[in-house]
Amino acid sequence: MNKQSLIATGLNGLVGSKFASDFAESYSFDRMDISDKNHPVDITNLEQVREVFKNSSAKFVLHLAAFTNVTAAWEQSGDYDGIAYQVNVEGTKNIIKACQEFDKHLIHISTAYVFDGENDEMYKEEDELCPIEWYGQTKADAEQEVRKSDIDWTILRIDQPFRSDIFPKVDVVHRIIEGIKNNNLYPQFTDHYFGPTFIDDFAKVIDWVIRTKASGLYNATSGEMWSDFDFATMINQTLDLGGEVKEGKLEDYLKTISRPYQRNTALDSSKLISQLDFKLKTIQEAISTLK
Ligand SMILES: NC(=O)c1ccc[n+]([C@@H]2O[C@H](COP(=O)([O-])OP(=O)(O)OC[C@H]3O[C@@H](n4cnc5c(N)ncnc54)[C@H](OP(=O)(O)O)[C@@H]3O)[C@@H](O)[C@H]2O)c1
């Protein structure tokens, strides 16, 4: 099978490495990895970005790279020279510029943290951006840069991604499993909600975007809304871990920290789900694959 060229950032990360391995047969990657020993590409350096684009026949650019440590980003609040702003906003601006110059379609990965978390319902695509901390602010700014550009673009927003296998950067599900097994799981909030994203399925969503040239803004989680407590309890039961999940309150936790915390980051992904040509697993089916 002829592989399709794809320019990509962030393919070593939690999300990107799963796409790279699951779709290694479909795509040949023109990678932009800052940690590459031979050809490091820092997306905050426009010339390094341009060099990759210049030498690539790819029609699509998958942009996953980001500064993703939310607490470390919070410590940089308001710092436009800081690494979080530089990578997430200036890096994305460089990718947009290169897409303009070399006529590429950008697939930009975003987050539910562009919202304040005050909704009682799941967030829809058309809801106004209203970040409450610096990581969310930088990702919202990056989204705005993409949305106001004149290139072809697709934005996929995800929340709390987890995968079927173990990865060095431990995801929400593997953290809960370890906590239950070691009997040191923190009390799980009954008043905090989120929308888990099964990365194995999300990799297929990225492939679907490329296959169908779907453009515009999509919420791209698994489309469900869970409280931390219900989620951990479901994992405990589905995987027969036989441990204990204790209840806690976000409200009490918030009294102990200064960083703002979104109360609800679940995304309504029904627009995406209605257009996909395959079925996403339910969250419980996804957890079952970890057995
Ligand atoms: N993880 C989450 O909870 C979550 C939730 C919602 C949305 N997202 C979004 O999903 C995307 C992927 O997240 P992830 O968790 O997979 O990320 P991750 O594991 O933290 O990986 C981040 C990636 O960004 C790359 N990177 C950082 N700075 C760079 C620079 N200056 N130049 C080039 N590459 C750079 C890193 O490259 P090297 O490997 O070469 O160092 C790494 O591959 C991000 O856009 C993130 O905002 C993540």
Image (cartoon, rainbow, N blue to C red):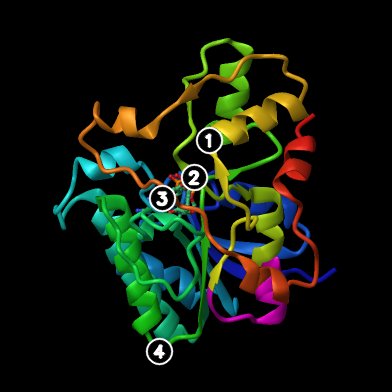
- The residue singled out by tag 2 in the image is 193
Confirm or deny contact between disc 3 and disc 1 (CB under 8 A): no
Looking at the rendered structure, the kind of residue marked 2 is Tyr
Q: SS for tag 2?
A: strand
Span shown in magenta = 207-217
Confirm or deny contact between disc 1 and disc 2 (CB under 8 A): yes
As for residue 159 lying within the magenta part, the answer is no
- Depth order, front residue of 138/11: 138
Q: Nearer the viewer, mark 4 or mark 2?
A: 2
Cβ of mark 3 under 8 A from ligand 1: yes
- The residue singled out by tag 3 in the image is 34
Q: Quadrant of residue 119?
A: bottom left
- The residue singled out by tag 1 in the image is 228
Q: Nearer the viewer, mark 3 or mark 1?
A: 1
Q: Residue furthest bottom?
A: 150
Cα separation between marks 1 and 2? 6 Å
Q: Position of residue 4 (x, y in %)?
A: 71, 72
For the point 45% across and 38% down, which residue is it? Answer: 191
Cα separation between marks 2 and 3? 34 Å
Q: SS for tag 3?
A: loop
For the point 33% across and 74% down, which residue is it? Answer: 144
Cα separation between marks 1 and 4? 39 Å
Horizontally, residue 82 falls left or right of residue 267, namely left
Confirm or deny contact between disc 3 and disc 4 (CB under 8 A): no
Cα separation between marks 3 and 1? 34 Å
Q: Earlier in the sequence, mark 1 or mark 2?
A: 2
The N terminus lies in which quarter of the figure? bottom right
Mark 3 nearby-residue class (10 Å; few <14, some 14–19, many ≥20) = some
